[in-house]
Image (tube, grey):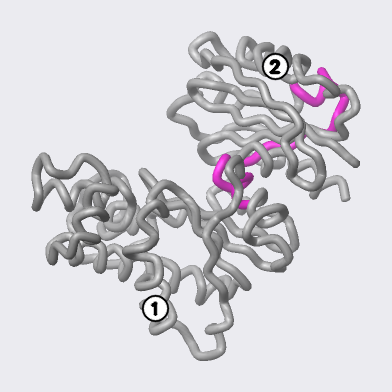
Amino acid sequence: MRNFIGVDLGGTNIRAAIVSEDGTIKCMKKSESHPERGAEAVMETMISLIESLDGYEECEGIGMGIPGPIDTINGKIIVSTNLPKLIGFPIAEYIENHFHKPTFMDNDVKVAALGEAVQGAGKGYPIVYYVTISTGVGGALVIDQKVISGQNGHAGEIGNICIDRNREKYNILNVGAVENEASGTAVTRKGKAIFGDKVNHAGDVFDLARSGDEQALKIVDDMAYDLAMMFSAIGHIIDPHVFVVGGGVMKGKDVFFEKMESYYRSMIHVGMQPVVFKEALLDEPGIIGAAMLPMTHLK
């Protein structure tokens, strides 16, 4: 069975794993990334981590998932808050030259989407749209097991989709951006405004909704409707076979997911109704998806 190396590079840690073509993680190691030391120092840490994996020499390729917009053609970070010293550095070329293995990189949400499309809830579907709802809202399109990055690496940045221009302005995103209205952060903000210290995170609002609190139920209902508006915008452009939904907010799926899908189906054309909604399956979609990058490119 073919094996590939998947790398998850973040501002705090680097994780590297050997993943088989069926999505099984055979071994995984972790090290602190220390991006403040500079690009080459981070690369050397990554190289040492990969070389500590038993059997790395036999792997056919290397894939990396990295936060922020990625230049997938030239293998560079375009924008990064947590890895500023790596912006513009030829990461993929550096790693490929060392290991002499085909090396690819993409945004962390996009590789998670690829993992779910190839080995997770989207397996077997030609067109998969992956959405993660947690602190923010992110997404990615996978067609025939190829993740779509777009001209500038920004494809799938759905958190900035405007679902209502009559909302308040919170940050650099559009007024009424779905991330500011229906993410875990948004639900927490709205909950705190009503319930004060009773709410520390979105889960507290979901718990109140489960208990039948009318104000909490209103927050959840608004969230479901706003998410449906976002899915409608995506659906009318992409018309995917399946939406795969992950992220921490899915812990509250029992109070919003069915309602969200119902709203969505009321917003779309009759001919689009066959679309399926599924919860993400993989425990490690990022590391598996990173390994799937070389596998899908080297077919």
Rendered location of residue 164, percent (x, y): 26, 67
Neighbour tally class for label 1: few under 14, some 14-19, many 20 plus, Cα within 10 Å: few
Rendered location of residue 255, percent (x, y): 32, 63
Mark 1, residue position: 262
| Front-lying residue, 229 or 59 | 59
Magenta highlight range: 95-113
At numbered mark 1, what does the secondary structure look like: helix, strand or loop?
helix
In three-dimensional space, the C-alpha distance between marks 1 and 2, rounded to whole angstroms, equals: 46 Å
Quadrant of the image occupied by residue 108: top right
List the single residue furthest toward the bottom: 270
| Front-lying residue, 94 or 144 | 144
Rendered location of residue 59, percent (x, y): 86, 31
Amino acid type at image mark 2 = Leu
Q: Which residue is rendered at x = 73% and y = 27% of the image?
A: 27
Question: Is residue 230 positioned above or below 204 on the image?
Answer: below
Horizontal side of residue 218 vs 262, given as left or right: left
| Front-lying residue, 159 or 57 | 57
